[in-house]
Image (cartoon, rainbow, N blue to C red):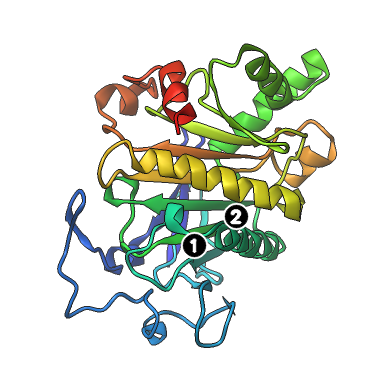
Amino acid sequence: MSEMRKNKLTGEWIIYAENRKKRPYEFEKKMEKKDIKNNPCPFCKGNEDKTTKAIFQDRQKDWSIRVFPNRFPAVEQQSEKITTEGFYDAIAAVGRHEVVVDTPNHDETIEQFSLEHIENILTVLQKRFLDIKQTENVKQVQIFKNAGADAGMSIQHSHWQLIGLPTVSKRQENYEKTAKEYYDKNNSCILCDMIAWEKEHKSRVCCETEEFIAITPYASRFSYEIWLLPKKHISSFAQLEKKELKELAWMMKKMLKRITELREDISYNICFIEGGTEEVQQHGKGLHWSVQILPRIGGFAGLEFATETYINSVLPETAAKWYQEE
């Protein structure tokens, strides 16, 4: 059983999913991989019986993309009633948690995929996003990819995850609050104006296409953090059209290749950030949709955990020059 408890001081919701202690973990320490010869990878072709039943598979046998419910979900489609303590707030962690395996090959990584295949992956993610979003009581759908042990990856085989949550995260609420306040003051989108500023000054622009721009954010939390943004005001992943998905695939492949060249076996997270809840988007005051890619160089320590004040050893302007190089 999963449940969510609310931190009364911060307003954050914490998911408790004890079943996830049982999930397989293929790393000993950092990027030292366990010997799994006697414990075959459940995501490899031929081991389909080791996962839950597929929701989607692009081909019956010779598949390249496969989607199924997470065997050790953080949230569950059905949950027992939660017993609460009067002073505190808790709810059942009801939602959806899916895995998208994006290659049948155990050692292949996303920057090695063809552009066509990355575009197909994005299309599948978009369809799963829309399906989960329509689930009753789901208020936020988060798409993310953990690559490497330092990024929270437990199974080495490349994959994505989608989680439909019954609450809106505190970070998403802060995005929405900031976007609304900026819109009310300036009658424009904060990220539209950010893109215009970065295009004019150029010092943090990493890559640009007709439809997309990649920037290292002015106040990045992580060394070499990079944001991929549609140039026009698109507030949801659901709104991206085929041409935009194609350009996003190209930009993602190019930028991820540069990230993997930073150091051997580098870990990173890819997070899709919605431009606010559907209600906010309907009022026209939502943010842009964006992709945040977060290389995991170094770790958080006392200052970050205590204050959420981040120490970054690489200026975004320096990082942008790295990405600009071929």
Q: Nearer the viewer, residue 88 or 151?
A: 151
Characterize the local packing of mark 2: few (<14), some (14-19) or many (20 or more) Cα atoms within 10 angstroms. Answer: many
- Residue in the picture at 56% in, 58% down: 118
Query: Horizontal and vertical percent for residue 295?
Result: 38, 37
Report whether 220 appears left or right of 244: left
**Quadrant of the snapshot with the C terminus:** top left
Residue 50 is tagged as none
Displayed quadrant of residue 267: top left
Vertically, is 79 above or below 245? below
Q: Nearer the viewer, residue 32 or 281?
A: 32
* SS at badge 2: loop
Tag 1 near tag 2, CB within 8 Å: yes
**Residue where numbered disc 1 is placed:** 75
Displayed quadrant of residue 106: bottom left
- Residue in the picture at 52% in, 59% down: 114
Query: Horizontal and vertical percent for residue 139?
Result: 65, 52
